Amino acid sequence: MKKAFKILGIILGVIALLIAAFAAWVQLTPLPKFEPQSLDITVSRDSLSVARGRKVVETHCVGCHLGEDGKLSGRLFTKPDDPFGVIWSRNITNHPEKGIGSYKDGELAYLFRTGIRPNGEWAGPYMSFPMMSDEDVACLIAYLRSDSPLIQASEATHPEPKYTFLAKALIKMELFKPYPYDGKPKTAPPATDQIAYGRYLATAVYDCFNCHSASFETNNHFEPEKSPRFFGGGNPMHDMDFQPVVSANITMHKTAGIGSWTKEEFAAAVRTGARPDQRILSGAMPRYGLLDDQETDAIWAYLQTVPALDNELAKKN
């Protein structure tokens, strides 16, 4: 019996040492860095390209990066008790040191594809468009090089992320990591193929499925339809004031989703935030006022093809 207790004690001691070593590795070693790249990309500065990029930046990116100075200078992105820590969104104005003004076009393109900055740091899964077409990535960059007041140089600086033990462990174990880049050209379907174009807008450009599926952690950005509760909502998040909200079910279920809405009511809600019953959508939902009828019609047409889900979590939203 004494021998058995001794063996058990040794085993427990080894386990304790392994746990201590793992904790020390997570807490005391630096976060991994990755090999940065500069992609071969042609960026046109013409007005049409800038206008296309503006649609994405001024409706999608502003939600995270709009600072107190009215520019895309960054802000507090997570609340203090967030399970992943205290994170500030970055200054993405064209300031050469405090923003992204010194980034090459190809470096920005690689950042959008993978989340890897030119210094090898991983920006996290927040600022990546792995399936956006090469042309639309170029339009994003064209806008970020434009004379828009939102991106004029800002001196704003913010603290480095204060990741929790959980976040550090997930990153170091490569459960959270940059998106892979295969180097293959990416194109958008033609706008004349309405359903395919709507899918592209809703999954690769405006990232609608990312909020409106079950969870950010379980979403599949390369095969969006494999994301749990795809467009069925129920994803817990917070608005700009860090008030908790749950994403809405935007499948065509007649009672739990938006199946009773008309195409015109959907377009109005997307652009203004006003539901058909005149209730206002949560501030966590961006207002896509820059989208034209062709885009909202295409997204609506695509949503008709998504399986309707009866999701109790998202009914009230």
Image (cartoon, rainbow, N blue to C red):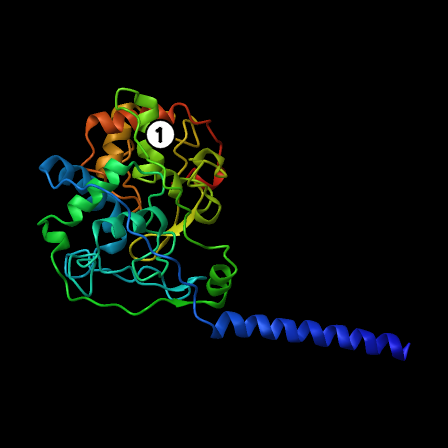
Residue type beneath disc 1:
Arg
Give 78 or 7, whichever is nearer the viewer: 7
- Seen in the picture, residue 1 relative to 275 is either above or below; the reply is below
- Seen in the picture, residue 270 relative to 86 is either above or below; the reply is above
Name the image quarter holding the C terminus.
top left
Name the image quarter holding the N terminus.
bottom right
Q: Quadrant of residue 98?
A: bottom left
Give 311 or 168, whichever is nearer the viewer: 168
Disc 1 designates what residue?
199
Q: Quadrant of residue 253?
A: top left
Q: Residue placed farthest to the top in the image? A: 192
Circle 1 SS class: helix
Residue displayed at 54% across by 75% down: 24
Q: Residue placed farthest to the front in the image? A: 40
Give 300 or 89, whichever is nearer the viewer: 89
- Seen in the picture, residue 185 relative to 151 is either above or below; the reply is above
Q: Measured from the top left, where is residue 290 in percent x and y?
A: 18, 37
- Say left or right for 18 vs 298: right
Total marks in image: 1
- Say left or right for 182 vs 74: right
Q: Residue placed farthest to the right in the image? A: 1
Residue count near mark 1 (Cα–Cα under 10 Å), binned few <14, some 14–19, many ≥20: many
Q: Measured from the top left, where is residue 275 in percent x and y?
A: 28, 34
Give 234 or 162, whichever is nearer the viewer: 162
Q: Quadrant of residue 280?
A: top left
